[in-house]
Amino acid sequence: FCGHGRRLDERFGELGAERLVPRTDCEPEYEQPFDQWLKEVRAALEVTTPQATPTPRAAATAAAPVPPAENQPARPSRAEPVTARLTGNRLLSLPGATKEVRAFTVDTRHADTPLTYTAGDALGVRPLNCPDLVAEWLAVTGLDPAADVDIDGHGPVALETALHRHLDITRITPDLLRLVADHTGDRSLKKLLRPDNKGERDRWTWGRQAVDVLAEHPVRATAAAWAEVLGPLRPRLYSIASSPLEDPHRMRLTVSVIRYESPLGRMRKGVASTFLADAEPDSPVPVFVQRNDRFRPPADPATPMIMVGPGTGVAPFLGFLEERRALGHSGANWLFFGEQHR
């Protein structure tokens, strides 16, 4: 756990380096600890870095007019996505197939802020939790859906809205298990939380969602307590399976839709994949582009391209091939992919 970072920090300390701020070790729920660490680093740098006296050239550069920030539209980001439209939803897998694979088309031409991408980038999708799962959460916790909870960046919102839009109500976090174990006194849950028992905890949580834990171990806690142990609902990244040279406003995704039966015999589903799969035509979808400058098709039109995706999917390579076709590239292309049934 954070082994390399810890060893690097300790070695710098042994060599006499001075820490600006204490080291922060993060679990997968890293956003809030990182934000706090970054604030501390910035504050420490402001104290330790003297104000430099500008040279004449630097002063002249600083005096150059800069366009007002308010006149420049903010680039869509994870924190500030734009609203696109889901204009295509086509089932690719055959009836009776073990996987439900769909091709989605996302149209951004009417987005408030332009969204540009390059073949090899990923599209971030900000999903909403399924209303049925939200209703199940409210039922097993016995909480008032109108109760207010504080959500970072959004202020007080109704619990039902928080569960639907802001909180990850599927993932079983260690904090959630700890809350349930403390309220119930269940020794088996406390055993799962031991630092040396991560493997067993991973096996136990496999196939379960947070609401399944509450169904097995009923707990009565406040809305604020649950909001504390549920992580934020994160965006999901999907490789873009198209090239902007075909249509700069439309992006295609190929997605395996997750639906399965939990160990308790309840039907469960992936948050984002079913958010897209079950959406009505032309539904709004909050999105942003995650750039990947190290993952691009060859610039030289004659360069051969070998694409390997056994088990990782071929979506980005569809975009690569579409781009090479649009540019008239002549280089040979080989695609190696995984086939589960041969």
Image (cartoon, rainbow, N blue to C red):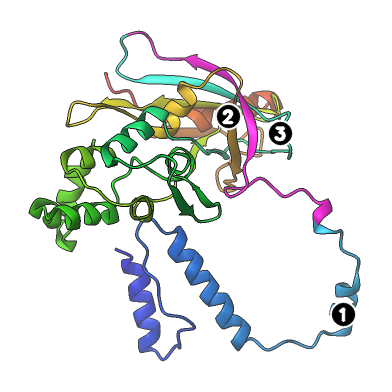
Judging depth in this view, the residue of 212 and 75 nearest the camera is: 212
Q: Quick one: label 1, few (<14), some, or many (20+) residues within 10 Å? A: few
Q: Does the magenta stretch include residue 74?
A: yes
Label ID, residue 324 = none
Disc nearest the viewer among 2 and 3: 3
Judging depth in this view, the residue of 25 and 150 nearest the camera is: 150
Magenta stretch: give its range. Answer: 70-95
> What secondary structure is found at the residue carrying circle 3?
loop
Report, in whole angstroms, how far the alpha carbon at label 2 lies from the one at label 3: 22 Å
Report, in whole angstroms, how far the alpha carbon at label 1 lies from the one at label 3: 39 Å
Q: Which image quarter holds the N terminus?
A: bottom left
Q: Quick one: label 2, few (<14), some, or many (20+) residues within 10 Å? A: many
- The amino acid marked with disc number 2 is Gly
Of callouts 1 and 3, the N-terminal one: 1
In the image, residue 329 sits, relative to residue 193, either above or below, namely: above
Of callouts 2 and 1, the N-terminal one: 1
Label ID, residue 111 = 3
Residue ID for mark 2? 319
> What secondary structure is found at the residue carrying circle 2?
helix
| Residue at x 51% of width, y 35% of height | 239
Q: Quick one: label 3, few (<14), some, or many (20+) residues within 10 Å? A: some
Residue ID for mark 1? 59
- The amino acid marked with disc number 3 is Ala
